[in-house]
Image (cartoon, grey):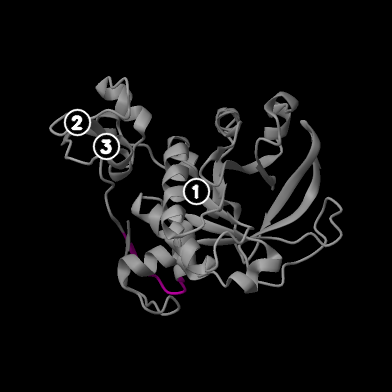
Amino acid sequence: MGYIIDISHHQDPVKIDYDKLAKQLDLVIIRTQYGSRTIDRHYKTHHREFKKRGIPTATYAWVRGKCIPEMRKEAASFCDRTRQFNPTFWFLDVEEKSMSDMRSGVSAYVDQLRKLGVEKIGIYIAHHLYQQFNLNLDEVEAVWIPHYGRNIGKVDSKPAYPCDLHQYTSRGRLNGYSGYLDLNRPMNGRTIEFFTDEVKSKPQLKPKQQAKEITYIVKKGDTLSEIAAKYKTTVDKLAELNNIKNVNLIYPGQKIRISVAAKKQEKIHIVKKGDTLWDIAKKYNTTIKKLAKDNGIKDPNLIYPGQKIKIK
């Protein structure tokens, strides 16, 4: 099994031998922003270079909103800046008390990401703030906690709280980068596939099924960013497709061409004796929470042979 690292612009691309480093990795989690105003200087380069070498990339953003509207704004900018890289997981980095009620603030951030179409969301919560912030961790797919012990470059501790990903050192060393790296390991029975989404193994649609084009008529008050979010695309793609020079200038009645992905067909899994919802979620690269929600299952521990489980 390879390593899971998380990086930001503190790991300068000029100091990285991506070929050497990538050979040791299963996943890279890349920071997009620190709040909504500070954009990570190298996040685009990191995504492109690791993806070129076949390494799945996830993403994270440091949360700094001072009120509910600011939390939603941060979520929107995070989504708009990162969507083009199709990250396997989206993490909120919660290490700062930016508002008095962090629970409601982070919930608003998560809710906004959901509204923008993000499915696999996780929360990175500082170990010493876990109880104080009392975040609603049931509303996300994964919990990521840092806990280093003696911080000696290898596993030397275990978090006091349940988590799916454990950041076990900030002093890791790997070939291809001369500085220290954060190293992480799956916990709670999770496998690397849960975080990487097995993108490369998914069957590809035939070209004619991949996308279709629709036309959107701009209404008063619309922005290109809102339209992009609604149709799960990016401002840059809309601007290129419609030859829009200034993305801040659109007008009511304007026709916007939008390329949208074809709707995926729904699969049905027939429960066999011995099946668990965890097994089914793992097989179809989804989560127990999503399966339960999509199938109206109130108790994830109670499924029965012959039951039909919809996989959306």
Q: Is residue 266 magenta?
A: no
On screen, residue 217 versus residue 188, left or right, reads left
Q: Give the labeled residue for mark 3.
A: 260
The residue singled out by tag 1 in the image is 197
- Image point (87%, 59%), residue name: 150
Q: Position of residue 80 (x, y in %)?
A: 42, 40
Q: From mark 1 to mark 3, how far is it between C-alphas?
A: 21 Å
Q: Amino acid at mark 1?
A: Asp
Tell us which disc is closer to us: 2 or 1: 2
Separation of marks 3 and 2 at Cα, in angstroms:
22 Å
Q: Characterize the magenta stretch by its predominant secondary structure.
A: loop
Amino acid type assigned to the residue bearing label 2 in the image: Tyr
Could you tell me which secondary element the residue under label 1 belongs to? Answer: loop
**Nearest to the observer: residue 226 or residue 140:** 226
Relative height, residue 102 to residue 91 (above, below): below
Q: Point out residue 164 in the picture as x, y percentages from the top left corner.
A: 61, 62
Badge 3 amino acid: Val
Which span is picked out in magenta?
268-276
Question: Is 219 on the left or on the right of 167, as rendered?
Answer: left
* Figure quadrant of residue 258: top left
